[in-house]
Amino acid sequence: ELKVEQNPLFLSMQEGKNYTIYCNYSTTSDRLYWYRQDPGKSLESLFVLLSNGAVKQEGRLMASLDTKARLSTLHITAAVHDLSATYFCAGIYTGANSKLTFGKGITLSVRP
Amino acid sequence: DVKVTQSSRYLVKRTGEKVFLECVQDMDHENMFWYRQDPGLGLRLIYFSYDVKMKEKGDIPEGYSVSREKKERFSLILESASTNQTSMYLCASSFGLLYEQYFGPGTRLTVT
């Protein structure tokens, strides 16, 4: 059974600094997804990482995937307040009863 | 843009009532999903459907049922609401099981 772990669950960031958050998963995941959730809102898809070494970037966020280490990272460049949100990663294993398995999410708070 | 809508943003029901939550997507997606989101527990899959009239149990189907009579519409039914079903309910849809999921705005259900 696929398990997805995110650490830490909460991260306070200073504006202008760079940070990296991590997503570990326990068994083979065919794809790795990153979602963002603003307080009181729904989830918004950020990235879909398809294969080992995949890197995707959007604005100040860059996501990468290392399938051998079973690790995805989300790098934040020069954090700004607008990036304050909860970030979920999710994996999927396309075996029997395949379904998306979410981590518990990391809540990022960017302070001045 | 994919649009997933849910029938209510907020709902208050009494214990024992039958509750219907409806989800509609406008992108002709094959797959639709119901999750509940609780603090500290993340997102948990209740049921999903990969075609009209087809359904599969997720991680926590007990106390819930679903209906998918039309491709664009997926309903979650609480046969007899209980206080432990107080939660945020999120509907999602996707083109295929490996494709990113698009989420609706969520329904915050309170059972008193």
Image (spheres, rainbow, N blue to C red):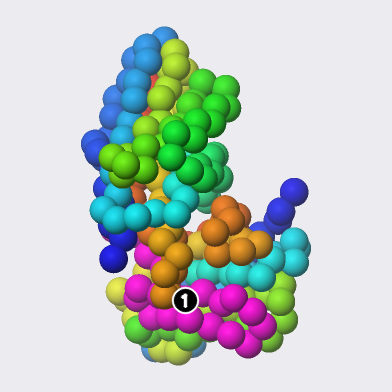
Q: Residue at x 69, y 66 (%)?
A: B29
Q: Residue at x 37, y 37 (%)?
A: A66
Residue B42: say if magenta.
yes
B99 is higher (above) or lower (below) than B49: above
B54 is higher (above) or lower (below) than B48: below
Q: Which residues are magenta?
A: B35-61
Q: Secondary structure at mark 1?
A: strand
Residue B72 location in percent, x, y? 71, 72
Q: Chain of mark 1?
A: B
B83 is higher (above) or lower (below) than A23: below
**Can you tell which quarter of the image residue B97 is in?**
bottom right
**Can you tell which quarter of the image residue B71 is in?**
bottom right
Local packing at callout 1 (Cα closer than 10 Å; few below 14, some 14-19, many 20+) is many
Residue A3: say if magenta.
no
Image quadrant containing the C terminus of chain A? top left
Q: Residue at x 75, y 49 (%)?
A: B1
Residue A45 location in percent, x, y? 55, 45
Query: What type is the residue that disc 1 sits on?
Result: Tyr
**Can you tell which quarter of the image residue B110 is in?**
bottom left
Q: Decide which of B106, A21 is in the foreground and name it.
A: A21
Q: Decide which of B11, A95 is in the foreground and name it.
A: A95
Residue B85 location in percent, x, y? 36, 74
Q: Decide which of A9, A54 is in the foreground and name it.
A: A54
The residue indicated by pointer 1 is: B47
Image quadrant containing the N terminus of chain A? bottom left
